[in-house]
Amino acid sequence: MLTRLKLMNFRCYSHFSWFVPEQGAIIIGDNARGKTSLLEAICFLLRLQSPRTSRLQPMQKHGTQQFGVRGEISGQVHRLLWNAESLDLQINGEPINDHRSYLSNSWPVVWLGNDDLTLVRTGADARRRYMDFVGAQWHPEYRLSLFNYRKILKTRNYLLKHKPGDKLQLDTWSQMLAVHGDKLSRLRNELLTLLCPHIIQAYAHISGQAEHISVEYQASSASNSLYDHLCNELDRDIRYGQTQTGPHRDDLLIQLNGNPAAQFASEGQQRSICIAMKLAQSALLCEETGRPPIHLIDDVFGELDPSRRLAFINALPPDSQSIITTTQLQWMPKSQCPYPVFTLADGQLHPSIRES
């Protein structure tokens, strides 16, 4: 678990230090005061990914040349330092030269955010990101397959746009793309098979209703062979200048009581589905890695009624560390609050004294 967090020039923080309670904490603060940035820093330290941006520069405090995050995690000191040229990684003072080695010594993470409704409401990008964030922590080959697939896809798309007449080279890259794409699709299907029972159980706990939720994998190609499909659709790919089929276009079909949740579920039901999918991620990662994930929960209570809020809090695994942000906590009786409460003010966390 995370026991100490230090930031340097990260987002709005010049310097920040916090001894993190073992069970986690609830952080109360107004909007735009840095609550989300604290969770983002923890996520980036542990997974080298930000849920808010794919670029590193936005995480750097304006007007500075670098940023750093340091954390003590189950007896190990993890430290990263970024400037415009490189990301320097260390564990216990020893340089780590590749991301894979760093992540293999890190801790699983579950991120729950206010924009998780995109999992249900909008296009397939959010659902693929969900699978990829879980998959990269679940299976050592998933992250490698995803990395190779994306790299090869970028090259194939370049050829489609700039060298469409070089059919021999396009075929070579199509074969390589199919190898990694078929493997990635297989891993995603395996992952979803493992996740679904946890999603069903978590949704039943959160909603308290006799509702049936299902999640199915939808491939962008009906063909069993991605290579065959790439060959058959080569002229179309050339016409569009990009690859139209493959895992980068796959999706998840989320249904509630047999109907698409995006169209037929209420806002509270959609929020409950999103939370259930994240709790399922937590349960699976705990099973697969032997480590209870750290939950980073950013202001998700706004669209839940009080009963669902309390059900969600009670559904969090008691042996996991959960760090939760919110703008107010009047809805939770003091006697039912399982975490220490802190108030964020002037860039620092202060223990909060609640009267009721």
Image (cartoon, rainbow, N blue to C red):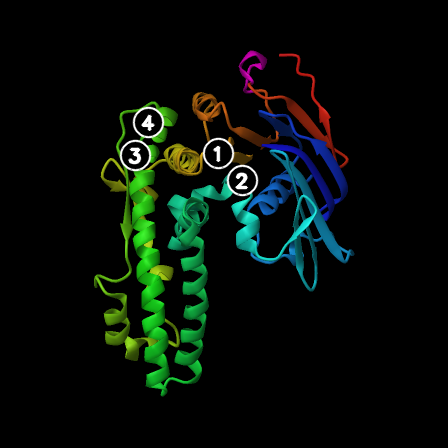
Q: Residues within 10 Å of mark 2 (few under 14, many from 20)?
A: many
Q: Indicate the position of residue 102 as horizontal and vertical percent values.
A: 57, 50
Front label number (4 vs 3): 3
Mark 2 and mark 1: span between their CA atoms? 7 Å
301 or 111: nearer the viewer: 111
Task: Give left or right: position of 37 versus 164.
Answer: right
Q: Which residue is mark 1?
A: 291
- Give the farthest residue toward the bottom: 165
Nearer the observer: mark 4 or 2; the answer is 2
For mark 3, what is the residue?
197
Q: Residue at x 44, y 54 (%)?
A: 143
Determine whether 138 is above or below 64 in the image.
above
Disc 4 vs disc 2: Cβ atoms closer than 8 Å? no
Closer to the chain start, of discs 1 and 4, is: 4
- Which comes sooner in the sequence, label 3 or label 2? 2
Residue 204's mark? 4
Which residue is more in the foreground, 62 or 167? Answer: 167
Is tag 4's residue or tag 3's residue first in the polypeptide sequence?
3
The amino acid sitting under disc 3 is: Pro
Callout 2: SS: loop
Q: Are marks 2 and 1 in contact (CB under 8 Å)?
A: yes
- Please name the amino acid that badge 1 sits on: Arg
Identify the magenta region.
Answer: 331-337
How far apart, in angstroms, are the residues tagged by discs 4 and 3?
11 Å
Of the numbered discs 4 and 2, the one sitting upstream in the chain is 2
Q: Residue at x 31, y 32 (%)?
A: 200
Question: Gap between marks 4 and 2, in whole Å?
Answer: 28 Å
| Residue designated by label 2 | 107
Q: Nearer the viewer, mark 1 or mark 4?
A: 1
Q: CA distance from mark 3 to mark 2?
A: 23 Å
Query: Pointer 4 and pointer 3: residues touching (CB < 8 Å)?
Result: no
What is the x, y in percent for residue 280? Answer: 39, 35
